[in-house]
Amino acid sequence: MSTQPLGERHRLSSPDAETHIRPLTVDVVICTYTDARWELLCRAVASVQQQTAPVNAILLCVDHNDDLYERCLRQWPADGQRQTPAVRVLRNRFDGRLGSARNTAVERADASIIAFLDDDAQAEPTWVATLLEVFRQPAAVAVGGAPLPSFETSRPGWFPPEFDWVFGCHYRGLPESLAPVRHLIGASMAVRTEALRSVGGFHSDDHDDMDLSHRIAGAFGAASVLYEPRARISHFVPAQRVTWTYFWRRCYTINRSKVRAFSDMEEAGNLGAELAFARAMVGTVISRLFGGLRGKPDLLGQAGAIIAGLAVAAIGHARGRVELRAGLLPTSKTVGLQGP
């Protein structure tokens, strides 16, 4: 979860002359692990190749799936590619999952900016250009875009838009214009390559985007992590993710595992965004209840879902704290890059 919305557009420090002169280059990283997303993966790659701003290379990292790796090589062969940008197919060389797969790609990146796109997402044509616009300001170190949900089935009326973070999408409460946030959404984010390597890359396979956001803010200041909602992607949401069972389980498991993630972050961890979100939901629930009493039953359902989601999240957090003290929660750390 992230910071509450800021009404005014965040003003970064004025760029110096060198920033204007030095060109920014971008490598886009897409990590994948299952053949079940093959069509979505092909669309994700194609969306990057159709960007209005030039992309140096697409680094496609396959996470411990030999058959999928070979299929990717056949689709995007290393030699003779005429596609622009070219696709470089990699194997995750670490033992972990998403965070370590991203680290494998970070090791091979050549551009000054590394952008990350999920394999079940499609970037709008101006996605890279919009991110680069922010990076032309020297204060920007990590910049996130808005993953907008693309539902396989209709969205349930009871599902509160404030909880779209459950399936990794932009949710009501995030800034509606450029602003600093505590936590970027990994489906659509970009980081200066030098800064990313300086903090040792991704340190976590669970909550890898949150972990990186906090450590970048700890190293470069809170204003260095920015959210630009104009940098949009379409993030696929399968039917099973808009069910009540998925909703409460995600609220529970995410907040349970966050306890370990924040512990692993040490001094970089900060629960401020989570607490601010919970406080903001009090007023939201009251507003939805009044709306429901005026004859809008979906709003009553959303109020109930918010209350239930917060309650389940609190239970998950409490259990995580107990398990952490008892040494029962496994570490979320993964093998990362070596710092400078």
Image (tube, rainbow, N blue to C red):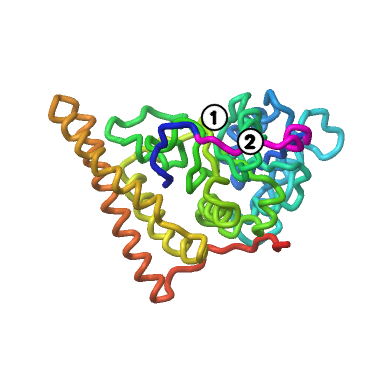
Does residue 283 lie above or below 275 as drawn? above
Asked if one can make out residue 67 in the rendered structure from this viewpoint, the answer is yes
Q: Residue furthest left?
A: 293
Using residue 107 as the reference point, say whether residue 280 is left or right of it: left
Q: Please identify the dominant SS of the magenta region.
A: loop
| Residue 321 x, y percent position in the rendering | 36, 67
| Residue 139 x, y percent position in the rendering | 62, 43
| Circle 1 residue | 232
Using residue 334 as the reference point, say whether residue 239 is left or right of it: left
Q: Which label's residue is closer to the chain start, 1 or 2?
A: 2
Asked if one can make out residue 235 in the rendered structure from this viewpoint, the answer is no
Using residue 284 as the reference point, say whether residue 67 is left or right of it: right
The segment highlighted magenta reads 10-22
Q: Hey, which quadrant is residue 75 in on the image?
A: top right
Q: Nearer the viewer, mark 1 or mark 2?
A: 2
> Magenta segment: does it hold 275?
no
Quadrant containing the C terminus in the rendered view: bottom right
Pointer 1 and pointer 2: residues touching (CB < 8 Å)?
Answer: no
| Circle 2 residue | 14
**In this orientation, which residue lies closer to the viewer: 226 or 187?**
226
Q: Hey, which quadrant is residue 244 in on the image?
A: top left
Q: Amino acid at mark 1?
A: Arg
Q: Amino acid at mark 2?
A: Ser
